[in-house]
Amino acid sequence: MSNTAALGAIEYEIETTWGEDVTTFTTHRLPVLDAIDVSGLVHNKIAPNRVVQYRNDGTPWITMDQGGEFKVKLHLTGHGSTTSGATTVMAIETFLGYVFGNVTVSSATGTTVTGGTATAPTLAGGAFAASSLCRIGAIGDGRGNGQFYAVNAHGANLVLLTAMDATPNNGDVVYSAVNIYPSETPTSGSVQSMRMRFLSANLKYEAHGVFPKSLSISGLNAGEVPTIEVTLGVSWWRQTATGTFPSTVTQSAFTPAPVAAGSFFLQTVGTTTRSKRTHRDLSIEYTMGIAELKGPGGLNQYQSTIGARRLPDSIRVSWSEDAATTIDDLWTSTNRLHACITLSAVAGSAVGFYMPNLCITGARPLQFNGDGINRQRIEAMAYTGPELAAGELGLSAFRMGFA
């Protein structure tokens, strides 16, 4: 008898070889939001169109190769626990690292402030990576305010690319973060494949050679809950009898925080002075560049996709503000900008973004009616640089922080 479609689970593992025929699924169960839909998996038969001798004669159809795609929607939950102490990458962060390309911690441990300034606090410990994100202080303290900050370097002091509101007090907490970001170097276009198992109260399916194709980030405005929807391609798949439902595989099902008490730092590249925009809505359109590779050497008789490579991404940021001349000034200027955005500042549920190089694009902002208020909208493209730091993190055009 058929059962409800509202119940289900997705388990995943990384593959050592693209599309390998391995049936272990024990690493992680994705905390998906929507009902699991495998209707996008593809395996078709086509007509052979063979010449026959009778009007209504026919021959068996040809079973073709497999493919298709499916979507998973997840909350952007932050790290799931405080990063004031020892910090390691969680399973859900690892998955998002496979989607974007990379994941790493800013520092193996958080620490506290012992002195310094709003742009270069002195820390009691920790070793924060250049170009990483951190979070400092607590909401409403008038100093770090629990917001995200971009790190320039960490030597005698933690040198910030984005200054705090005021000099921190001794004892203010400096939180580590998990950084999720794309690769930028010309030879770093590899894609890590995965395998996934879809479980329900009726049928079960395995998907092999799974790879990210696109993503959509939403819920970035005040009072919303941030989410990410990832479209994943499939190299080959099959219906299976293996797997237990309900699944007992571990799940990082953390509770997200709404977008509240955050900030939008926007400043000319190279300038650290605190400058915050009062934005009314925010959109990040992240278009992944992925090339699906077809060819020989598959590990299943129906596998024609044997890999994928990363191409340039397109990262567009747009936001609106109450109408003011400063919006037009942004558009008429040729300055490159950098932005550090905090969605929420709750320990364990904080989510932020840093884009080191924004170039204003699109139409000149004009006044429009937004919720009955005169507003203007402006957009920019996020690029790597222009001040290139070492490594993929320092080169990345987009960094998402969980803390």
Image (cartoon, rainbow, N blue to C red):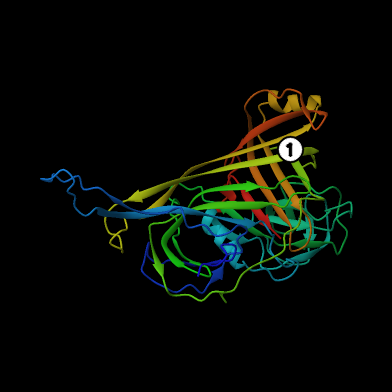
Q: Which is more toward the observer, 181 or 18?
A: 18
Picture coordinates of residue 382 (x, y %)? Answer: 60, 39
Name the quadrant of the C terminus. bottom right
Picture coordinates of residue 393 (x, y %)? Answer: 58, 53
Task: Give the image quarter of residue 83.
Answer: bottom right
User: What residue would you read off at disc 1?
Assistant: 267
The residue at 69%/30% (across/down) is 378
On screen, residue 50 versus residue 173, left or right, reads left
Amino acid type shown at disc 1: Gln
Tell me: residue 372, above or below residue 27: above
On screen, residue 389 versus residue 133, left or right, reads left
Q: Residues within 10 Å of mark 1 (few under 14, many from 20)?
A: many
Picture coordinates of residue 296 (x, y %)? Answer: 26, 55
The residue at 89%/51% (across/down) is 142
Picture coordinates of residue 293 (x, y %)? Answer: 35, 50
Tell me: residue 74, above or below residue 316: below
Q: Secondary structure at mark 1?
A: strand
On screen, residue 362 versus residue 258, left or right, reads left
